[in-house]
Structure formats: C-alpha cells, structure tokens
Image (cartoon, helix red, strand yellow):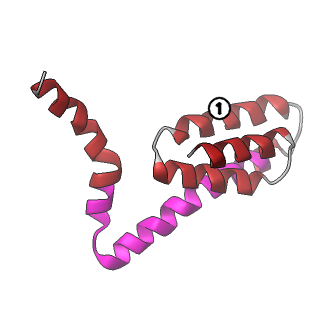
Amino acid sequence: MLLPIVTSAFFVVSKKRFFATGLLLGLAFLFKIVAIFDLGAFLAFCFILNFNSLKKELKLFKIVEGFLLPFFLVSLLFLANGTLIDFIKAAFLAKCFLRELWKQYR
C-alpha cells in the first residue's frame, strides 16, 4: 500500500500524471481503505497549489476518475461472478464489525 501512495505523492508534487495518481490511490484503496484519506489530502493539496488556475477542476477530476476506475473494474468482476454483495461485505463492512467482536472478548 505504501509504494502506490508514495509514487502518487511524487506525481502530485511534480504536477504531472494526475490520472496515474488517482489510479495508484485507487489500487491502494483496494488493499486498504485508509487510502481514501490520502486521496483527500492530495485533492486538498492540488486545490491549494492550483488555487488561481482555471485547470484545477480538470486536474481534480482526473485524480477522482483514476481513483474510482479500479474500484469499478473490481466491482464489475464480482458482479459478473454474482458475488458483489460478498465483496462489499468483506471489503468494507466486515472491518466495522471487528471492533464489536473485539469488545466481546475483552
């Protein structure tokens, strides 16, 4: 998870490859959900860095578009197999219930 985030940070700082930045963050999000906070930080950084630029909306859109692409592709794969609900439960909802299970064993 760290390699895609560091690489996307390099792309944001160099002001190049905004779609690749979003794509790498999307891949990191598939591994670990906390990458969404990095997305928010990179979007805020790009917004502040390009505050007076007219192209800032396009850059932010490219990052968000690249971020959502891996999620939609993986969702389509699970939808084609008929296991989309299982994917959503395992990837996003199961982590919410782990805290409740941990409290039971304390």
In-front residue for pair 59/97: 97
Q: Is residue 13 left or right of residue 31?
A: right
Residue 40 lies, in percent from the top left, at: 61, 35
How many residues crowd mark 1 within 10 Å: few (<14), some (14–19), many (20+)? few
Q: Which amino acid lies under the numbered mark 1 shown in the image of this protein? A: Ala
Q: Is residue 7 above or below residue 49?
A: below
Relative to residue 22, is residue 13 drawn left or right?
right
In the image, is residue 81 part of the stretch drawn in magenta?
yes
Residue 83 in picture, x, y percent from top left: 28, 69
User: Which residue is at 83% across, 31% downward?
Assistant: 49
Residue lying at 77% horizontally and 36% vertically, measured from the top left: 46
Which quarter shows the C terminus? top left
Q: Is residue 48 above or below residue 89?
A: above
Magenta stretch encompasses residue 14: no
The total of numbered circles placed on residues is 1
Residue marked by disc 1: 41
Answer with the quarter of the image where residue 101 lies: top left
Q: Nearer the viewer, residue 85 or 13?
A: 13
Q: Is residue 16 above or below residue 44?
A: below
Q: Residue furthest top?
A: 106
Magenta stretch in the rendered image = 59-88
The residue positioned farthest toward the left in the image shown: 104
Q: Which residue corresponds to the image point at 69% horizontal and 37% vertical from the top-left?
A: 43
The residue at 85%/50% (across/down) is: 16
Vertical order, 91 against 86 (above or below) = above
Main SS type for the magenta part?
helix
The image position of residue 105, as x and y in percent, is: 11, 27
The percent coordinates of residue 55 (x first, y second) are 85, 46
Q: Quadrant of residue 87?
A: bottom left
Closest to the observer, 95 or 80: 95
Q: Secondary structure at mark 1?
A: helix
